[in-house]
């Protein structure tokens, strides 16, 4: 019968012990943090992908739907605005928009401010999909954080925020305050 108590050591502990044995003078403390962040990201990505599949959306398409949703009514942005917000090339954005348009989740309409451009909007079906997919997404994130008390979640969020305040401006497409 499997134990409901988590083990005392995680996979990263195993890797770090190997590094310590192989290179005892190597300063591996940063690796302890980032290896765990990368591993958690991989686990979250896997679980998110699994939960989105039955909903007919992949994580990249969810990102488009979520970006349009969080911008509020009328849930409309240009492809360039979407690409910049999501750090994507125009080609990658076009592919995502093509799939979402074929699925009836977004529509491209002429841009009233630029005759050469288009505006991408969520359709009614897209807004319904956004609700379902967003609920699945938030459920997964909540499950992953469930072992932490609310105060520890808040502390983790604040510590990560501190790091982003220092480094985020260096990322391409970063949001300026």
Image (cartoon, rainbow, N blue to C red):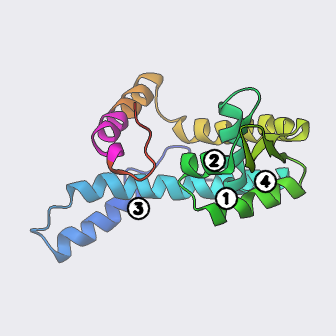
Eye-nearest disc, 1 or 4: 1
Residue 65, by quadrant, is: top right
Vertical order, 93 against 166 (above or below): below
Residue depicted at 36% across the width and 29% down the height: 158
Eye-nearest disc, 1 or 3: 1
Residue 29 shows in the view: yes
Residue depicted at 14% across the width and 61% down the height: 27
Q: Are marks 1 and 2 in contact (CB under 8 Å)?
A: yes
Residue depicted at 71% across the width and 34% down the height: 69
Residue depicted at 46% across the width and 58% down the height: 39
For label 2, the residue is 82
Q: Earlier in the sequence, mark 1 or mark 3?
A: 3
Vertical order, 8 against 176 (above or below): below
Label 2: how many Cα within 10 Å (few below 14, some 14–19, many 20+): many
Q: Judging from the image, what secondary structure is the residue with disc 1 in?
A: helix
Q: CA distance from mark 2 to mark 4?
A: 17 Å
Write down the region rendered in magenta: 159-169
Q: CA distance from mark 1 to mark 2?
A: 8 Å
**Mark drawn on residue 57:** 4
Q: Earlier in the sequence, mark 2 or mark 4?
A: 4
SS majority, magenta: helix
Q: Judging from the image, what secondary structure is the residue with disc 2 in?
A: helix
For label 1, the residue is 93
For label 3, the residue is 11
Residue 32, by quadrant, is: bottom left
Q: CA distance from mark 3 to mark 4?
A: 31 Å
Residue 3 shows in the view: no
Residue 54 at x, y percent in the picture: 84, 54
């Amino acid at each position: 019968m499997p134990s409901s108590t988590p083990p005392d050591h995680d996979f990263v502990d195993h890797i770090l012990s190997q590094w310590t044995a192989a290179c005892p003078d190597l300063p591996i403390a940063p690796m302890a943090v980032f290896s765990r962040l990368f591993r958690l990201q991989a686990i979250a990505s896997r679980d998110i992908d699994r939960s989105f599949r039955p909903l007919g959306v992949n994580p990249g398409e969810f990102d488009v739907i979520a970006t349009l949703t969080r911008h509020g009514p009328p849930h409309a942005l240009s492809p360039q605005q979407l690409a910049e917000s999501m750090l994507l090339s125009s080609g990658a954005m076009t592919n995502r928009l093509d799939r979402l348009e074929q699925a009836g989740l977004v529509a491209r309409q002429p841009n009233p401010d630029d005759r050469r451009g288009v505006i991408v909007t969520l359709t009614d079906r897209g807004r319904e999909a956004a609700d379902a997919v967003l609920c699945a997404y938030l459920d997964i994130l909540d499950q992953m954080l469930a072992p932490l008390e609310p105060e520890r979640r808040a502390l983790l969020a604040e510590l990560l925020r501190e790091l982003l305040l220092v480094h985020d401006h260096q990322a391409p497409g970063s949001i300026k305050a």
